[in-house]
């Protein structure tokens, strides 16, 4: 490890040259060994039809499970969380849609036996709690949890049909304990790392693949919580950190993080490598595919995060992946943000070449530069993207 050691508390050391703020704090190597384990998350965008569970499972086997020991985290079927939220906002039809969708998936995936009893129980649960979830956040989270709880069964069933030994690991089995901020709960890190690590590894060591629902946790009193939209990424990185996995792969529909939204700039392309500091900053602008809470809570994860599509193309984010240069351009009301180490220099050059009326460059720090302007941020993104990335 390079850098000047500044302080040392509870096995953590702070080094001077490693990054900004608390990103400088990292787990001292040797406290626990990094494991040759992979945590892979299947995003909801990848499961739109029953056949998708089969397709994704085949890819998981071929590209990941045959090569490494792994744990799997899964999101709800695309659109289900939205419907569950609608139910609790008083939309009666949404309940029928959820039930109909889950029944159709069960039928087409041939879910039978104990799995099917479980699916039946979930249906009863969503009906019962939907009547109360408008008033109570506790009941609302119970309803919202149904999507991931169904999906984990669908994926486990598909993988076990393919001959794999899988075991569903519920948050209450492996200790994904959160606070009781229903709807936006946070995992009780670092206290829960040890328990989660031991329970998940135990399943793997006994020859099974743990399949874990993303997005949900449980309070110490046993109430189901949800951790906010998109937080199945947080679950995956949490499991990766707790098991000391070398890699967390977040599988999604798009090939990783793009230089900017391709709807704004068709020539936008995948950023190959970013470091954690850049990743965290990008996540604050809800850059597609990046959940802010995974950086906020599991900032001491020391492995790699890969955000990949089904052909395994995408972005690698890791602590020691610092490289100079702009990585991502994100618009916001009032301007744009250019994220990347040393982005200030490139932005100054770009703006210098394109005098834009009343625009102001604000160096936030070494890793982020803002261009504040009254101009249309979308137009601004196009101009700066062209200058910085050449397209
Ligand atoms: N299903 C949840 C959502 O739609 C969690 C996730 O997909 O990450 O927000
Ligand atoms: Mg997501």
Image (tube, rainbow, N blue to C red):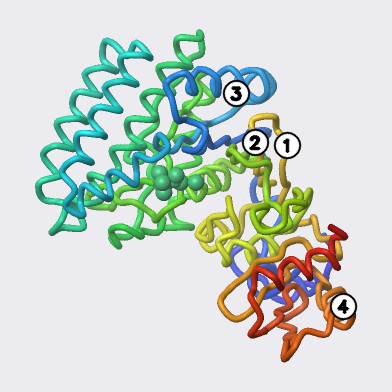
Q: Of callouts 3 and 1, which one flags the residue occurring earlier in the amino acid sequence?
A: 3
Circle 2 or circle 3, nearest the eye: 2
- Residue 236 locus on image (x, y percent): 52, 43
Residue displayed at 34% across by 21% down = 105
Q: Which residue is mark 1?
A: 313
Q: Quadrant of the N terminus?
A: bottom right
Determine which residue is flagged by label 2: 309
Q: Which mark is residue 60?
A: 3
Q: Residues within 10 Å of mark 2 (few under 14, many from 20)?
A: many
The residue indicated by pointer 4 is: 345
Q: Residues within 10 Å of mark 3 (few under 14, many from 20)?
A: some
Residue 218 seen from this side = yes
Give me the C-alpha separation between circle 3 and circle 4.
42 Å
Please say if the residues under marks 1 and 4 sit with CB atoms less than 8 Å apart.
no
Q: Is mark 1 within 8 Å of ligand 2?
A: no
The residue that appears at 80% across and 65% down in the rendered structure is 326
Residue located at (34% from left, 39% from top): 80
Task: In the rendered view, tell whether residue 124 sits above or below residue 219.
Answer: above
Q: Secondary structure at mark 3?
A: helix
- Which of the two labelled residues, at mark 2 and mark 4, occupies the earlier sequence position? 2
Name the residue rendered at 62%, 34% in the picture.
38
Relative depth, front residue between 179 and 232 = 232
Cα distance, mark 2 to mark 3? 12 Å
**Does dot 2 land on a helix, a strand or a loop?**
loop
Secondary structure of the residue carrying numbered label 1:
loop
Indicate which disc, 1 or 4, sits on the residue closer to the N terminus: 1
User: Viewed as shown, does residue 16 lie left or right of 234?
Assistant: right
In the shown orientation, is residue 346 left or right of residue 204? Answer: right
Q: Mark 1 and mark 2 in contact? Answer it, CB < 8 Å.
A: yes
Q: Which mark is residue 148?
A: none
């Amino acid at each position: 490890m390079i850098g000047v050691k500044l302080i040392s508390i509870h096995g953590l050391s702070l080094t001077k040259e490693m990054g900004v703020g608390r990103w400088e704090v990292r787990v001292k190597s040797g406290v626990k060994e990094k494991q040759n384990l992979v945590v892979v998350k299947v995003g909801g965008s990848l499961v739109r039809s029953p056949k998708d569970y089969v397709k994704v499972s085949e890819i998981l086997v071929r590209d990941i499970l045959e090569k490494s020991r792994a744990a799997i985290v899964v999101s709800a079927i695309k659109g289900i969380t939205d419907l569950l939220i609608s139910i609790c906002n008083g939309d009666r039809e949404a309940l029928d849609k959820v039930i109909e969708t889950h029944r159709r998936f069960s039928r087409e995936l041939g879910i039978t036996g104990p799995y099917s009893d479980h699916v039946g129980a979930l249906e009863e649960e969503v009906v019962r709690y939907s009547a109360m979830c408008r008033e109570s956040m506790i009941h609302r989270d119970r309803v919202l949890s149904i999507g991931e709880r169904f999906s984990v069964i669908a994926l486990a069933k598909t993988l076990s049909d393919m001959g794999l030994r899988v075991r569903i690991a519920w948050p209450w089995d492996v200790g994904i304990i959160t606070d009781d901020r229903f709807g936006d709960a946070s995992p009780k890190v670092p206290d829960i790392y040890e328990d989660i690590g031991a329970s998940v590894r135990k399943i793997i060591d006994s020859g099974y693949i743990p399949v874990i629902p993303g997005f949900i946790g449980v309070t110490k009193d046993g109430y189901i919580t949800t951790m906010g939209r998109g937080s199945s990424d947080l679950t995956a990185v949490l499991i990766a950190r707790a098991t000391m996995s070398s890699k967390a792969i977040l599988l999604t529909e798009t090939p990783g993080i793009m230089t900017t939204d391709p709807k704004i700039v068709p020539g936008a392309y995948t950023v190959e490598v970013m470091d954690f500091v850049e990743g965290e900053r990008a996540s604050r602008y809800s850059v597609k595919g990046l959940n802010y809470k995974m950086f906020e809570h599991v900032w001491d994860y020391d492995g790699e995060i890969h955000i990949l599509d089904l052909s395994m193309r995408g972005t690698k984010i890791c602590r020691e992946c610092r490289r100079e240069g702009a990585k991502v351009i994100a618009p916001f009301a009032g301007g744009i943000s250019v994220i990347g180490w040393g982005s200030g220099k490139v932005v100054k050059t770009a703006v210098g070449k394109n005098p834009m009326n009343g625009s102001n460059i604000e160096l936030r720090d070494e890793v982020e530069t803002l261009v504040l302007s009254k101009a249309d941020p979308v137009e601004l993104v196009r101009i700066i993207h062209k200058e910085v990335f050449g397209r």
